[in-house]
Image (cartoon, rainbow, N blue to C red):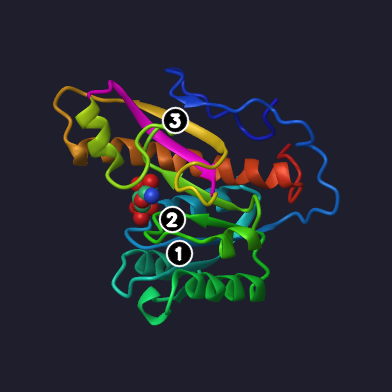
Amino acid sequence: MPAFPDPSHPDCSVQWPLPQPGAAAAAGHRNELRLAVMASGSGSNFEALVRACRAGCPRGAVALLVVNNPGCAAIARAERLGVPWQMLDHRGHGSREDLDRALIDLFQRQEIDLVVMAGWMRVVTPVLIGAFPGRLVNIHPSLLPSFRGMHAAAQALEAGVTLAGCTAHLVTEEVDAGQILVQAAVPVLVDDDVNSLSQRIQQQEHRILPLAVQLAAERLGLTVPQG
Ligand code: GRF
């Protein structure tokens, strides 16, 4: 059975992953995960994750927010929530790899266990992925593998699907293609536009991202299942 409260909705919109072998064997874990979040925009997923941690799932705390845009709204959320934040402006780094090396340095100095990309609008390189194997989680506003890349809600409307949704997954070199952790579906309504559909999807992102983080940590043996 899943180790934390069953998030299934009566309408079955959340697809709950089956228990994974070894999920309970967390030798050498520490009880409190140290999480970092990378964000470029509004930061609503960052805030949802902070609040979920404070409510007990995932078992840990967001120790650091990293942003790459001086004006992004995620900063104000961090200030309000009392979460330390750091600016790493990509324009000050010569290449994507340089930016990733700066991120690694920051995360290692802060003893970060697991990193969450929550609206980080930069493509990461094998440099960062290799430094955090299986420890880099992304949230994407579609039911992957459909509608990768930017403008996923617009793509869903354009395709005429009647179900859309979101996916929390591990990050690999191929964009929006890593192992799926948790997905949730939402209906597409007849009068939806990109804005209304995106809002409905985001509500589900806020539910599944914390679950995905806990799940990824359990699979790595970084934490024990929640009892
Ligand atoms: C989310 O919809 C996420 O799926 C996408 O970027 C958006 C970030 O939103 N990758 P927020 O900054 O968390 O509000």
Residue nearer the viewer, 34 or 151: 151
Which residue corresponds to the image point at 45% horizontal and 48% vertical from the top-left? 175
Q: Is residue 207 left or right of residue 29?
A: left
Instruction: Identify which amino acid the numbered label 2 is placed on.
Output: Glu
Residue nearer the viewer, 57 or 98: 98
* Label 2 with label 1: CB-CB less than 8 Å: yes
- Say the numbered circle drawn on residue 47: 2
Q: Earlier in the sequence, mark 2 or mark 1?
A: 2
Q: Earlier in the sequence, mark 2 or mark 3?
A: 2
Q: For the residues carrying marks 2 and 1, which lies nearer the camera in this image?
A: 2
Identity of the residue furthest to the right in this view: 27
Q: Earlier in the sequence, mark 1 or mark 3?
A: 1
Q: Position of residue 182 (x, y in %)?
A: 53, 34
Label 3: which residue?
Answer: 184
Q: Position of residue 98 (x, y in %)?
A: 50, 75
Instruction: Identify which amino acid the numbered label 1 is placed on.
Output: Leu
Vertical comparison of 187 with 172: above or below:
above
Q: Measure the C-alpha gap from mark 2 to mark 3.
A: 19 Å
Label 1: which residue?
Answer: 81
* Label 2 with label 3: CB-CB less than 8 Å: no
Dot 1 lies on which element? helix
Q: Which residues are magenta?
A: 160-171
Instruction: Identify which amino acid the numbered label 3 is placed on.
Output: Ala
Give the number of marks: 3
Which residue corresponds to the image point at 31% horizontal and 47% vertical from the top-left? 150
Mark 2 CB lies closer than 8 A to ligand 1: yes
The crowding category of the residue bearing disc 3, from other C-alpha atoms within 10 Å (few below 14, some 14 to 19, many at least 20), is many
Q: Please state, as top left, top right, bottom left or bottom right, where the C terminus lies in the image.
A: top right
Is residue 162 within the magenta segment?
yes
Is residue 56 within the magenta segment?
no
Quadrant of res 40: bottom left
